Image: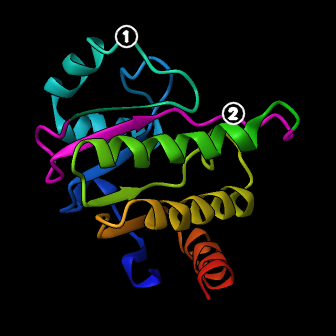
Amino acid sequence: MKEKVTIMVGDITKLDVDAIVNAANNSLLGGGGVDGAIHRAAGPKLVAECATLRGCRTGDAKITKGYDLVARHVIHTVGPVWHGGSKGEPGLLRNAYRNCFKVAHENNVKSIAFPAISAGVYGYPMKDACRIAMEEAGTALGEYPDLEMIVFVCFSESAHAIYQETFSAIFG
């Protein structure tokens, strides 16, 4: 199972996978960080399709085409903004990952790449967000045996180190 998980530092918009995950805002119409980068790389047809989806609730996920990306699809999810952990943030972040894996399965996605959902401008503590990401990846690999590859794309070497450490603790 652990051989299906890859952790790297890089640009998620350049990956040749079935789907990349967009850490989106509720409007799905673009924003900063990875959301803005994905929208810029995918081109204007992405925002046009997103406009037809009527947004996305925190913890949910929706799929679009990849347009000018190498990836065939973009799975948009909205992670929680961190408010100290007492406003349901862990459950909402788990739901974001679970719903991404569910949407991937429903759309025959065999390879999927994730950014660190909620761990950027939304302020979720990286170690906690990473633990949830890894736990949900392990669950998804057990639940969806047709899933061939999960890539976690980190934005820095320090994030990469946290992901590697957490991966070792969870997957052994």
Residue 11, visible in the rendered structure: yes
**In screen coordinates, is 66 left or right of 6?**
left
**In which quadrant will I find the N terminus?**
bottom left
Give x and y (percent) for residue 45.
14, 24
Q: Which kind of residue does numbered mark 1 sit on?
A: Arg
Residue at image position (54%, 40%) is 96
Look at the picture and state if 79 lies above or below 142. Answer: above
Whole-percent x and y of residue 73? 21, 43
Residue 102: mark = none
Residue 116 position, x and y percent, is: 54, 54
Span colored in magenta: 65-85
**Residue picked out by circle 2:** 81
In reply to whether residue 86 is colored magenta, the answer given is: no
- What's the CA distance linking mark 2 and mark 1? 20 Å
Position of 133 relative to 48 (above/below): below
Q: Residue furthest bottom?
A: 172
List the residue tagged with mark 1: 54
Q: Are marks 2 and 1 in contact (CB under 8 Å)?
A: no
Residue drawn at the location 24% of the way across and 53% of the way down: 109
User: In the visual, does 51 lie left or right of 97?
Assistant: left
- Would you say 52 lies left or right of 30 here? left
Report the coloring of the rendering. Answer: rainbow
Q: Secondary structure at mark 2?
A: loop
Q: Is residue 43 above or below residue 7?
A: above
Q: Position of residue 88 (x, y in %)?
A: 78, 34
Front-lying residue, 124 or 60: 60
At 23% across and 62% down in the image, what residue appears? 15
Q: Secondary structure at mark 1?
A: loop
How many numbered marks appear? 2
